[in-house]
Image (cartoon, rainbow, N blue to C red):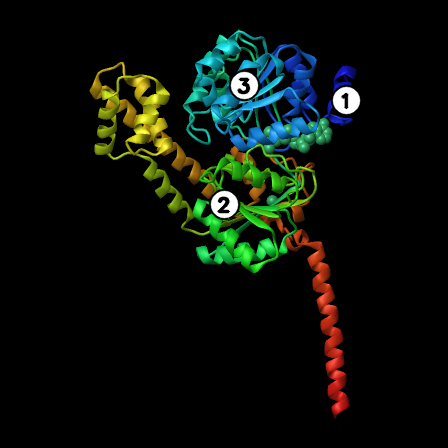
Amino acid sequence: MDKQLHQTLARYFGYHAFKEGQEDIIQSVLHQKDTVAMLPTGGGKSLCYQIPGYLTDGLVLIISPLLSLMEDQVERMKMRGEKRVAALNSTLSFREKQQIIRHLPSYKFLFVAPEALMSEVLLEQLKSMQIGLFVVDEAHCISEWGHDFRPEYSKLGEWREAFGHPVALALTATATKQTLIDTVQTLHLQHPEFHIHSVNRPNIALVKEVHDTKEAKEKRAIELADTLQGPGLIYCPTRQMTEDIAQLVKQQTHERVEFYHGGMDAGDRMLIQQQFINGQIDLICCTSAFGMGIDKSDIRFVIHMSPPQSIEAFMQEIGRAGRDGQASVSVLMYTEEDADIQRHLIQTEGFEDSELDFFLAQLKQMPTIDEKKLREQLMEAGLQETRARMLTHYYLMYQAGPSQLLRKEVKEKLQDRQTEKVRKVRQFQERIVDRSCFRQSLLSYFDEQLDQKESSSSQHCCSSCGLVLSEYEKKDQQLELNEMKHWKTVLDRMFHRTKEAQH
Ligand SMILES: Nc1ncnc2c1ncn2[C@@H]1O[C@H](COP(=O)(O)OP(=O)(O)OP(=O)(O)O)[C@@H](O)[C@H]1O
Ligand SMILES: [Mg+2]
Ligand SMILES: [Zn+2]
């Protein structure tokens, strides 16, 4: 036990013991070793860069994928009294960004989206500073097949070198072996230390429910929202559905509900997230735009209207629940058509031959090779953002070769990507229809065996192991129900008596 570490833990965070894995990860970083760490959702990964930050010189640069996540982290650190923290992201005005960049030396912790590092001004300023620690949070996003297509992640290794090769720390809750390998390569890590822990979250009970129709799922979602102990999240596959379900829940229950998706104004999104964290909202109907990394301690249930596109995404999303360690539940609803719908969605991300030719021709005519500008021009030509990102990226990768080859290579890359996505959907689907223990089945995807000693008792494990969902219902509702029953009995008796009296 390291006294200095424990003092820092107590002084800055008010905790008296490390959670599993934290101390070793921190030690590894403090010994200047590049470190790859996997701790479960809610396992306390943020502390693994914050404590080294307090104990070493230089800026802690944290690469973080989502706006909502950055805001949550910055808020939390500020609430604990840390003033030297900022996030550079797309919600800031040009002037606000300039302000932060100009005053960089006065910050200790800086959160940035990888896209923000495309800015020359920021890169130059960072190069001139001492960076003590280079953190990649949610490092599974690094993988080319990661949760969304983010070409800037592939440049992180170069950027790190440009910053004078600071110690790197890659953090994730959901990486397969392949993703870990991608991480090491992309970040140019040399002889990293690996600290890999279980992805299991024993306090989250796992329920699967098969339904016949979308309407049946909606009806069930409202019932669950009404009866399960909150606060809760309902993950929906589309933006429209988040609005529809929120509306239905509002009409039919007493829950305070809002919806949240990527099509909303960033200010509105932040407001809703904050109100939820403060307990002014009981339930959020959201798309996958909400979630990863968000730390609200007392979320009691997470409902999925249909399976997300990968096991990693599912583990991330249910991982919002039970971060206080208390019993929580995940309910995954599905119909037999869900996987087909997903496959169809993935197909629409691809390109028809003629379309591919058209956009490649457009790219060739553009005078610049600036990735961002090319992408913007493609979007102006009518291409949706993710597709524009993919196409530009692969175009730049292969543009040096002859044009026939370029077309072939780009096409192959795009197809590989679709195949991989479809594979992920299938891998999840197989586990959903499987009747054995769902928890074990999910863990096997990460090459992990369920540790019997540590596993939750079967009645809190999963619906295949005999879980009792009623244990997760509202307690006060239970009381109300009981009270109603009580009054019903009283009324029945009175009624009975009156009837008797009439006779
Ligand atoms: N040593 C500790 N003792 C008690 N609580 C802790 C400790 N370390 C972290 N926590 C708390 O655990 C919660 C989860 O931490 P954190 O958000 O860092 O998790 P995470 O591993 O990043 O999860 P995710 O993968 O979902 O991002 C936070 O509220 C944090 O304050
Ligand atoms: Mg986190
Ligand atoms: Zn089970």
In this view, the residue in front, 394 or 310, is: 394
The disc at residue 26 is none
In percent of width and height, residue 484 lies at: 71, 67
Q: Quadrant of residue 317?
A: top right
Q: Earlier in the sequence, mark 1 or mark 3?
A: 1
Q: Nearer the viewer, residue 442 or 276?
A: 276
**Circle 1 crowding by C-alpha within 10 Å: few under 14, some 14–19, many from 20:** few
**SS for callout 3:** helix
Can the viewer see residue 28? yes
Q: Please give the residue where the numbered disc 1 appears in the rendered image.
A: 11
The reply to whether the C-beta atoms of the residues labelled 1 and 3 are less than 8 Å apart is no
Upstream in the sequence, badge 2 or badge 1? Answer: 1
Separation of marks 1 and 3 at Cα, in angstroms:
30 Å
Query: Could you tell me which secondary element the residue under label 2 belongs to?
Result: helix
Give the vertical position of 90 relative to 241 (above or below). above
Q: Quadrant of the C terminus?
A: bottom right
Question: Residue at left 21%, top 33%?
Answer: 354
Left or right: 421 with respect to 205? left
Give the amino acid at mark 2: Ile
Mark 2 = which residue?
Answer: 432
Residue receiving disc 3:
99
Q: In the image, residue 72 lies at what x, y percent?
A: 60, 32
